[in-house]
Amino acid sequence: MDPRSLRKSSTKSSGVNPSDTEGRLSPVQDVEGSSSDQDEVPELQKSASIEKNETNAGSVYWNHPFNRGAEQDPSMRIEGRRPSDARRKMSTAARRASNAARRASTAIVETAYKLDPLTVTTGNPLNLGVNEVRRVSSVGYTAPGQFNARRFSTLAPSIESIEKPAPSLSTHSSVTVPYVRQGMSEKQEDYIIQRLAAHDDVESLSRTKRFLYRLCPVLVVVTIAAYWIYFALRVRFTRDAEKAAHKTYWMAWAFILVELFVSIPMLLHRLWGWHVVGLRKRPKLRLIGDNVPSVDVVITCCGEDDDLVLDTAKAACNIDYPRERFRVLVCDDGKSKTLQEMIERTAETQFDNLYYRSRPKYPGVPHHFKAGNLNDALEETARLPGGAANFFAALDADMIPMRDWLRALLPHMLQDPKCSMACPPQLFYNVPPDDPLCQSLDTFVHISEPIKDSMGVAWCTGSGYVLRRAALQSIGGFPTGSLAEDVCCSSMLLGSGWHTAFVHEPLQFGTVPDSLTSHLKQRTRWTIGTVQTSFKLRFSLYGPLVKHMTFPQRLCGFVYTVSSLFTIFLVLSMFTAPIVLVSGGNLVPYRSINQLKWLIRANFLSSMLNRVNEFISYLPSGYRTGQRDARAMMWMAPFHAISVIRTFLLPKWLGGKVAVFTSSGSQKAELNERDPHLRAPLWRRLKVTIWDCQCYLHLIYIMFAIAAVAVSMYWNLTDDKNNTTKKTLISLLTHAYWPPIIWLSCILSCWIPINYAIFPPDCPDRQDLLVRDPDTGVAYPSEESKKTKITWASYAWEAQYTLITIYGVVVFVLSFWF
């Protein structure tokens, strides 16, 4: 039987109201030739409802604002607006062309998969169709009668008596199943999963962006090839210049060598772009109904504001999930009496599945920071009435979960018994305008993580994740000995043969550190934790902890570790160009004008392809966000390099020190630089930024680079050999002004933290960014606060990139005049 006819008949017999409230799932009539448009289903369900026209069976009537007056004026009906024959033929031709392009794209993808040694995972082992429902077995999971999360009752109620959420709230409970495959299990105790869309990121990545993103593999390969051609020409022409001059250009070779070391991790990261050729295939799923597995939700905190933690706890208790089936446990390493009283009062008056826990700490006994807190929570939940839940979820103290949080993550684990973890992206609602310090993780969570997930290398991003307790216990709980216990845990799960999943949906929103000091502590802690994890796992290359890792998983672990270590070479590359200039050296040696022309043209080709590749590859996170991340990589490099050297390379008597964990949420703002009313004076902000935060290194670099360029220009302008305008311009070009003028980009990037101290952004109070329910006190970020505001500063940065690009074009054109 045709699945479309089965779905229609099933829909008719089930009595589903297609115009059900938002959050309930309604079947959508299949239209021939529209299979690729299934990504639009959730948007269509939000903006319009599909109703069957009883007078004209076979037509579909959209209850859209365009048709609101259709009952009064039949001419306004969509079915009454017949297109002309010419327009219908054009539409048919366009549809055929689109189908042909789609078939060609599919063929290219399949061919690439056959040639690609890295396996791409689908994320859809049940092969669910859009809007299709499937039951999965509940065997092996705790039954409702065996688990009760509520503190003030002793017996778990039956499924029929579970309290339903208020009708005004979006819910997936009590949904009538619109379509069930033939032969599917229909046991009452089974869990029900429905696929909402073909991709989990359907709301964030439009069809146009998704199509353009398919160009990424070709652009990556072409860009890398162009760069290596240019690099090979530089090496070849430097050797020719040495032979002609009968001397060795030591500074030029130093510049080439450092550039090579810097390019290695960058090129390895670029190669990951090849695997977006098929894009991710992880679907958007929902767990529906009231029969759901049990979950222990843990909120870890250590010195954060009590109100901040309470907001997270209330939002966690308010998720769309039967209250008997999940517990929320606040694990406070800060031992706040005020927080304990607030949690207990909330449990008594609102959410009786809310608990408070503060573990004991004994002098001389290692407590292992956050990993120790999580392991204590594992033991504590097992001691609670009803025992441990089947799944273990964790939230940072500032991360407010959305109501669909568990219903969106759990289906990915229920459909795959080997899936040990599902993790959403970390998103934020208090990012300042233009995000000057690049505190959002958009580039990582919208680009890197989806690519890694497509190859089965999804990492735990630190908050909002759900773990299978059996899998976690199989590796001995959360690993200690690393400040990045989240990445270490997910890597060990992969090394034990478990699967992981990254669910690209906006399911949690938190806060970024509100000062430069706390931002630096957070990011350097992440770097140290990543390197600690790599040493523990032996760079993911060998050892019992990575025994069952696949090749992509080993490659990913190695590449990201190398990137952290190679920040040292990135710092060296920043200083190499000014050193070459101040020593009178030539950045680009050559033997003849013809060689110079080839270098200019190869450099132009590489730069232009790189610009296009940046635009395409940054589509998921946004072009401005990608450029902002590239700038942050530059000015943060000294801090990362110093932290790596001090922690892992230097002995204690030479300044080495053991890294100390500090919770990002507990790092109080010293200057209140983002509060226009409480902001410290300029002199104090500069003192803390330049001296305490060691940004004097950036200031020294800026002055040194400017001095080196000035000295180089003076020597070139006063050199007797440059007796013509042409020779003078060529000399300036090959010394200080070789495109894309790297030293200028480095200077502007290093100025960012100092400029931040002089012109800090104005940010509203956290409470002003939330929408709070006056009755329950539950707060969620406003829609406006979830987006980063763009001001003139972002356009100023783009003006710089544009001018440098134009300069490269001018030099390229002039190369035909030399």
Image: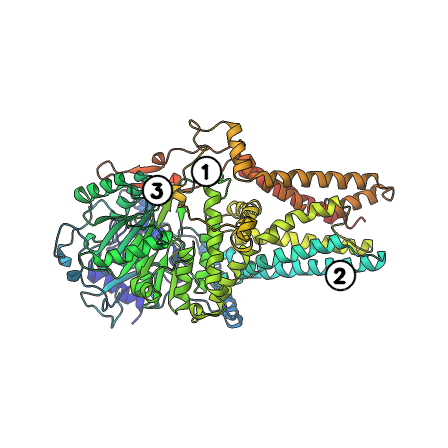
- SS category of the residue bearing label 2: helix
Residue at the image point whose x is 28% and y is 62% from the top = 193
- Would you call the spot at circle 3 few (<14 residues within 10 Å), some (14-19), or many (20 or more)? some
Residue with the mark numbered 2: 236
Question: Which of pointers 2 and 3 lies earlier in the amino acid sequence?
Answer: 2
- Report which residue position mark 3 lands on: 303
Q: Nearer the viewer, residue 332 or 431?
A: 332
Mark 1 / mark 2, whichever is N-terminal:
2
C-alpha gap between disc 2 and disc 3: 58 Å
User: Going 44% across and 34% down the picture, which residue do you hit?
Assistant: 670
Circle 3 or circle 1, nearest the eye: 3
Colour mapping used in the image: rainbow
- Position of 242 with respect to 1 (left or right) is right
Residue at position x 31%, y 61% from top?
411
> Where does the image place residue 436, in percent across and percent down from the top left?
51, 39
Residue 495 in the figure: left or right of residue 724: left
Q: Is residue 29 visible?
A: no
What amino acid type is highlighted by mark number 2?
Arg
Numbered disc 1: secondary structure? loop
- As drawn, 618 above or below 672: below
Depth check, mark 1 against mark 2: the one in front is: 1
Instruction: Decide which of 614, 168 is in the foreground and name it.
Output: 614
- Measured as percent of width and height from the top left, residue 470 is found at 30, 65
Q: How many marks?
A: 3
Q: Label 1: which residue?
A: 515
Amino acid, disc 3: Gly
Q: Relative to the observer, which residue lies in front, 490 or 767? A: 490
